[in-house]
Amino acid sequence: MSEQIKLTINGKEFTAEPSETILNIARRNNIFIPAICYLNSCSATLACRLCLVEVDGKQVYACNAKAKENIQIVTSNPSIEKERNAIMQVYCVNHPLQCGVCDKSGECELQNYTLYMQVTEQNYSIKDTHKPKQHWGVMNYDPALCIVCERCVTVCSDIIGSNSLSTTKRGGNELDKNLKESMPKDAYAMWNKLNKSLIAHDSDSCISCGECIAVCPTGAMISNNFQYTSNAWELEKIPAANPFYSDCSFMYYEVKQTSIDDTRKRVYRVTNEFHFQELCGAVRFCFDYENKDAVKNEVAFNNIINALKKAKNIIFNSYITNEEAFILQEISNFTKAKLVNNEAKLYKEFLENYSKTAGESLYNGSLESIKNSEFIISIGSFLKTDAPSIKNAINNSVKVNKANALFFHPLVDTNLELIGKKGKNTEFIYHKPNMQEYIFILLLKKYAFNLPSKFENLIDFEDSFLLQKLEKDESFIELLNNFSNDKKNFTLVIGEDVITHKNREFLAKIIGLIAKYTNFKVLIIPPKTNSLGVSLICNLEDKVNGFSIGYNELADFTIASFGKKDLDMPTLLEQEGTFTNLDKRVVPTNAALKYNGYTLNDIANAILNKDIEHTIEYTKTLPANKGFKEVEFDDLPNKFLNSGFEDRGYLLNSFNVIYENKIELPQIEEKVLNENEIFIYRKNPLNQVNEFTSVSKEFKDNIEDGIFFSKEKFSDLNLEKDSKVEVSTKNKTLILNAYIDNQLSGNIPYVSTFLKNENRELFLEDRYEIAKIRKV
């Protein structure tokens, strides 16, 4: 951290970083400066010019003016207020007077600032132009309501990285040149730009995340599933956490009763604190999956109690809370049933092996370390769908903080390639599947310092040999030098491909050495929402022969919130509890809707002879020896501060771990394709995560489940729309629907597994398999 400086705002002294903008310093200290175009963590556009302030007697824009030692800042005076008033008058020129039916009314920033600036008259006018409404995938765009603040363009570029929105010319009359002399200059400049522009959309690069809808200050961008369904002020905000990805991003379920006749509440939309944290499309639009028909079926409940007493296995997944994981462990302790969760077990073992060489029980990277990094490497993750928040954090660091980034993966994501400037501050290394050993050996060799001699056998390879295995030449070493020289803050992101790799034990240990003996902070992405929490709380084992109970997984007897089941359970939007997110933070989530059936807590009470009224009574009992703290659920903080600090839950404690003295190099086998064979990859399509997202009314009409090819590969195989293909691996042969993913390139297709069907049986633990594909 650089040495702090002192400055004065409205007569009061504050400290700041020299690189901070005046606007962010003011916000951090709860001093209000109006700004309608600026977003935290994004580059300034100067589109609105409302953030005018006076610095040492000179007017500047607070959104891009940096702090300097001893400057005197005044946030408001008669001249500034006159300029701001004129700007708001201009924004209101030809703006449709439809507040009574506008979806944004009641939370519209144009409304708020017009009142705040005390705009009581209109001194400006110009002939309007026809601006027809447009339908863009998950949203509708009304250019008549658009004030071209460019927040949507900025967030799409600087946070999401898709660059699918831009400003475009709209035509129309020119402003009267005499206005330049008679109007305040910033109001004229803003109007001149506003009068020429609209927003354009590129559907090919859009990922339907809806973040542009979230940041839009007016009703110009509204989601299809919310438009004309409710007034904003009728909705109750329920704070929660993203239930589909391990970022567990802060969000709100916004609810009210369904209708006059139906008083049951339903979720009308999902929103977020967009200045501080974004959301992916899955959570923003896939919220209509509650188990609303659940009832307390006493016969079914008693059957499950009897079944659990004889069960050999309890099979479950990581779309559960910490409290549910703890209850499952308590039941397992009592019944001696094995807890089976293969994905979390692999993650648990990987983290334990990593700890043996890193010396710490938890990895040391985070989203914040990515945003503050100057050099970032991602290995083994198809980021766009595996971990959207990490992709966004890397993009933000590259775009705004000018970091350099390297992405290693066999699949070519053309959307990801929109991040940065290829070859200048980003590079994409497309390597053969399951060759990550050589990548990590090269990184350890190049960046380690003070590596103990007992580990030197790991780096006893010539650069030329490692480069040959990665199919690279000497220019790759030059690239590494250019990207990392003179850089201090490094982050290494590890994805699920590495965790499921055949040589995962070795990879975990060498990554631990990288964390300990290089400048890299390491973030090991939990594959599912609560994989980290489950891996810490539960003793996970391999499945044994015998009767099995499934908790949200199919088994001999299934208790679940969705699909085929023997007893109803609540979905994640119908229960409260905590998740352990990828930042190693235990964060709370609240129930958006009432649930009328039995819960896992009811089962635990019956099995364990307890009388626990609410599941969240277990929050304070989560295992301290795994890093959890004895904190009541209702005492967990759950907000962002104006500074952007995430005051949510608490950070896990990390512990020292005894070092491993020796690491054996494994046999590294290159998978060789025979004639008519290709690699396939286990991955879900965009915004499909599990069976809950599949029922979303926003996406269900276009539900696609099967195998996904690039346009080129689809054509090479002579496939057509509605084609089916036979996919054969050593594990299984299936007939699958074939689709094109327009944002995929190359020869490796992927197979979706978000539905509980046979698709996943094409794979063992590895995300890659060799397959033969034949058109049916």
Image (cartoon, helix red, strand yellow):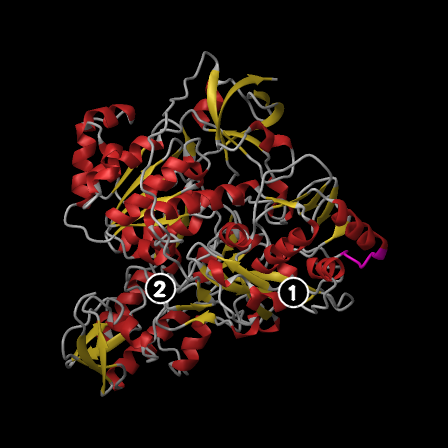
- Three-letter code for the amino acid on which mark 2 is drawn: Leu
* Nearest to the observer: residue 124 or residue 530: 530
Q: Which residues are magenta?
A: 293-298
Q: Residue at x 41, y 57 (%)?
A: 583
Could you say where residue 602 lies in the image, as x and y percent from the top left? 73, 61
Q: Residue furthest top?
A: 675
Q: Quadrant of the N terminus?
A: bottom left
- Please give the residue where the numbered disc 2 appears in the rendered image: 39
Numbered label attached to residue 210: none
* Residue 299 located left or right of residue 400: right
Q: From what the image shows, is residue 475 above or below residue 350?
A: above
Res 579 seen here:
yes
Could you say where residue 38 lies in the image, as x and y percent from the top left? 33, 65
Sequence-earlier tag: 2 or 1: 2
Label 2 crowding class (10 Å Cα cut-off): few <14, some 14-19, many 20+? many
Q: Element at badge 2?
A: loop
- Three-letter code for the amino acid on which mark 1 is drawn: Thr
* Residue 56 located left or right of residue 416: left
Could you say where residue 552 lies in the image, as x and y percent from the top left? 66, 47
Res 202 seen here:
no
- Please give the residue where the numbered disc 1 appears in the rendered image: 615
**Separation of residues labelled 2 and 1 (CA atoms):** 38 Å
Could you say where residue 707 lies in the image, as x and y percent from the top left? 55, 29
Q: Residue at x 44, y 47 (%)?
A: 387
State yes or no: residue 376 in magenta: no
* Nearest to the observer: residue 526 or residue 661: 661
* Residue 489 located left or right of residue 437: left
State yes or no: residue 294 in magenta: yes
Quadrant of residue 20 in the image? bottom left
